Image (cartoon, rainbow, N blue to C red):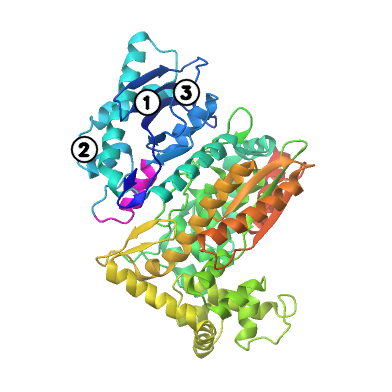
Amino acid sequence: MTRCGVEGPAGDIIVVDTEYSTPTGERPVPICAVAKNLGTGNETWVWLWGRKVEAPSFPADAIFVCYSAPAEMAIQEIMGWPLPQNVIDLYAEYRVKTNGHPHKPSKNGLIDACNFYGIPTPTSEHKKLMQDRCSEGGPFSDEEKEAILQYCSEDVDMTSRLFVAMRDDIDWPRALVRGMYGKAVAAIEGRGIPIDLNEYSRIRDNWDGLKDAVLLDINRQFPVFEDGIFKDILFEKVVQDNGYDWPRTPTGRLSRTKETFKNMVEIYPEVRDLADGVAMLGQMRLSGIEIGADGRNRASLRPYTSITGRCQPKTNLIWGHSVWYRNLISPREGMALSYLDYKSEEFGVAAYLSGDRQMIDAYRTGDPYMAFAIKAGLAPEGATKITHKDVRDRCKTVVLGLGYGMGDKSLAKRLDVPIHEARRMLRSYQEVFHQYHEWVREAVQQALLTGSQQTSYGWFHHCGGGRTKLLTIQNWPIQSAGSDILRLACIMLEKEGIRVISTIHDAVLIEDTIDDIDASVERAAELMELASSYALRGAGSIQVDANTIKFPDHYSDPRGDRMWERVQRILKELEASN
């Protein structure tokens, strides 16, 4: 089978769709499945609710086409059916095709994709009605069974038409890789993250008093709350008094989005307390984290949601909350967890993509910020983050700040140095890593000229017409390569049988027994580094750090320790007073 001169796998094209109910925090409960062979036109309907059904028989080399592979593969896995070898996820391919496209609908559902390609669809009201009924679960009357199967068949028909419309644009080798990733995501989402239910209950049951006390505590450092309300005029004063270079909205107000706070915390670490307070203020109760009966947090990773192709889980997954919530993650008795994180990933990716030898050498030292300080003459040979911590921290601020668009004035305020000193540090960075900066300049020019960007594994970005910020265009290749790396890592870890239970930006969380976790960590790190070398076309690999937590310890992130300790202190006071 050939598409646009690219050889794709031969075999029957089987379009599949399933319906299911998803109780909060649980794995999906299958309701029905419909499959259509595009070659013969034959359609198979299977009712699954409350039944153990043998897998329909299809050729081993068949290509399974669906819209959202994680959802469809999860149902097949739950039913105990063998997963197909070749999967094309039209949701992923639609995102590839339309990422940043000026005329793309705001949403990415099946109906939205069909509308983009001019394919007739049923009314959204009809689809919502059927989705709501499936979500409620059984029992189902005979009439409801027929209606749901018919609805599932309609989705198969839309998916079939969408495949026909898209097939000539599908980049088959890379699309099949994205299909493999869909299978991995289905398994990861199904496993879930173990939560300490006792600690969760303590926080939930004392939420109102806890929130009031935390905001009062934070207000002593950042006086932006008045009678439990965030005041923009007070926020303006805090920003001015501290000299923060804070982004503003088009209307001129200081931005308070989650993404803005995340970026500002990287530049001004002390702002994390304020970010946690703002996040807490918006919660009437401890909610959103979906926990199943087995005490595991499950929710969609929402792959390909961001323009860089990264997952963007909602707050029903624990990673979507403030960092201190992660202390609720706790391995079960006899088990262990390990958080494997790509080390200084964006610096390393930038070094290898640009081919900047000085930058590559700095990354391979294991501490690129200290290496930059030495190369720039800001620290002597042999300096370490222990002997020259202040210099290293300043150099780290330069490297991270440039990624967020920090200029000389902002850098001077952040480092509390004269403007000429900030300019000297920026100039040193550009001189030491001059090949990288030349590569960035050329990459931005090429993107503006062609109106597009693409990674080695085919993630695409429409960026023409002046719609995209220059800083976004500049950072996109590096961040999107990181997205490629994590997808390949998940595929390889799943194939190896390593139990990944979640992904987090550029990291994975794995689970194993206490006896076997060390061996699993060692092998996982090897595979993750190998995945990075594939995505970077053999230019180099990104190092991996591991943090292992064994029962009875709980997960801990240094960035959230201060807030967690505050929460624990206040909880004890509240419980003592009750």
Residue type, mark 3 in image: Pro
Residue type, mark 2 in image: Ile
Judge whether residue 286 can be spotted in this image: no
Q: Nearer the viewer, mark 1 or mark 2?
A: 1
- Give the quarter of the image for residue 88: top left
Main secondary-structure element of the magenta-colored stretch: helix
Which segment did they paint magenta? 90-102
For marks 3 and 2, the one nearer the N-term is: 3
Q: CA distance from mark 1 to mark 2?
A: 20 Å
Q: Is residue 131 left or right of residue 355?
A: left
Residue 164, compared with residue 18, is above or below; it is below
| Mark 1 burial class by Cα count in 10 Å: few <14, some 14-19, many 20+ | many
For marks 1 and 2, the one nearer the N-term is: 1
Q: Is residue 329 left or right of residue 173?
A: right
Residue on which disc 2 sits? 119
Residue on which disc 1 sits? 35
Figure quadrant of the N terminus: top left
User: Is 93 a magenta residue?
Assistant: yes
Judge whether residue 49 can be spotted in this image: yes
Tell me where residue 467 appears, x and y as whole percent: 28, 64
Q: Which mark is residue 30?
A: 3
